[in-house]
Image (cartoon, rainbow, N blue to C red):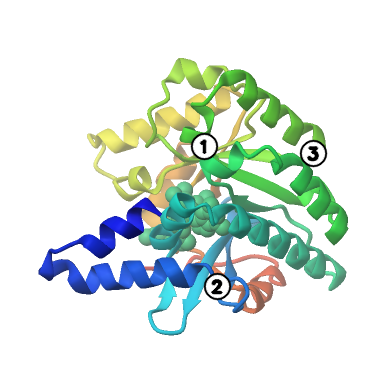
Amino acid sequence: MQSKVNLENSSDKTNSKHTNKLSSIESDLRYAIERNQLELYYQPKIYAKTNQMIGAEALIRWNHPKWGIISPNEFIPLAESTGLINEIGKWVKHTACTQIKAWHEAKLPMIPISINLSATRFLERDLITNIVQTLKETNLEAQYLEIEITESSLLENEEVVFSILDDLRNLGIKIALDDFGTGYSSLSYLNRFKGKIDILKIDRSFINDLSNSHEEDSNFIVNMIIQLSHQLKMSVIAEGVETIEQLNLLQKYNCNTIQGYLFSKPLPATEFAKLLKKDRLEPLENSI
Ligand code: C2E
Ligand code: MG
Ligand code: MG
Ligand code: MG
């Protein structure tokens, strides 16, 4: 609510268009679920050695009647600050599980699909019961649902975090650490999560900087994160892979699971289902 007051009181005329949009989307967000404006898109995760799809990530979109498709980077922070994130989080979980189950029933390949969890949502008391209930309602086996959290989720009370992670693992749900390398956790901190986190996702900003010129610092960092994940017995995924050059370097460094426009942008469910039917995906020539 705080942000709304600030926005409406803003006297900066040059920002007024932006401000109007922000305050109008804040009030519209309240009705987005009941007006059926939210949608999940799905982006493949590819095993680079065979070009097979071995997983996917569900990413939320808001089809706004006036502003068109609004990116989650714009409205998720707003949902977090207004508390709407709980309702949206439940919607995401339920919609993803229902969709995954429908693909199973349609005899499409059964692969795990991840959802993103806000740090605020991660710490909600009812998270685990809500997940259990959703899996039960949708009749989905837990192994097909993965959860992506960011480093900020891990910075809270360690006992609480450990107990949530343990509960999720006991259910059979895998946990990925998203945007890895952009947070503030130290390497020794990550060590504490050995056996508790299954997957590291290297942030897109590092992949973006990968280059064939060997002096690049970014190559070194990416290589280091990959070796670190192997040491900690975590799988590793590169996010935001857009070029063949990046793909080749990642494979050279032994990172074999990749996600990015090179293979596919996030797609609406019906489009995504067409990719799911394919034996393998080919890299796209003009991915960007
Ligand atoms: P994320 O979880 O790190 O998701 C990856 C983002 O990178 C997605 O942006 C995806 O579309 C984009 N991406 C993937 N490959 C490429 C590429 O090759 N090039 C470029 N330029 N971008 C690529 P998107 O869908 O806009 O989502 C942004 C962020 O919003 C997500 O980052 C995640 O933090 C958040 N988000 C998305 N859906 C949800 C949700 O259902 N719940 C919550 N709490 N957060 C969500
Ligand atoms: Mg993610
Ligand atoms: Mg990410
Ligand atoms: Mg992100």
Quadrant hosting residue 41: bottom right
> Of the residues shown, which amino acid type is indicated by label 2?
Tyr
Q: Is mark 2 within 8 Å of ligand 1?
A: no
x, y percentage for residue 180?
A: 45, 37
Depth check: give the residue in front, 151 or 3: 3
Image quadrant where one finds the C terminus: bottom left
Q: Which x, y percent locates residue 2? A: 36, 51
221 lies left or right of 251: left
The image quadrant of residue 110 is bottom right
Q: Amino acid at mark 3?
A: Gly
Estimate the x, y position of residue 188 in percent, counting from the top left: 47, 15
Amino acid type, residue under disc 1 in the picture: Asn
**Is residue 216 something one can see in this rendering?**
yes
Label 3 to label 1: alpha-carbon separation: 26 Å
Q: In the image, which disc is placed on residue 218?
A: none
> In the rendered structure, which disc, 3 or 1, sits on the residue that comes first in sequence?
3
Give residue 247's position: percent from left, percent from top.
44, 51
How many numbered discs?
Answer: 3
Question: Label 2: which residue?
Answer: 31
Q: In this image, 8 relative to 172: left or right? A: left
Q: Tag 2's secondary structure?
A: loop
Residue at screen point 52% across, 26% down? 156
Counting residues from the start of the chain, the first of labels 1 and 2 encountered is: 2
User: Residue at coordinates 41% horizontally, 20% vertically from top-left?
Assistant: 186
Circle 3 — which element?
Answer: loop
Viewer-proximal residue among 217 and 89: 89
Residue identified by numbered label 3: 172
Separation (CA) of disc 1 from disc 2: 45 Å
Q: Residue at x 44, y 20 (%)?
A: 187
Say which mark, if any, is on residue 254.
1
Query: Is 127 situated above or below 68?
Result: above
Q: Nearer the viewer, mark 3 or mark 1?
A: 3
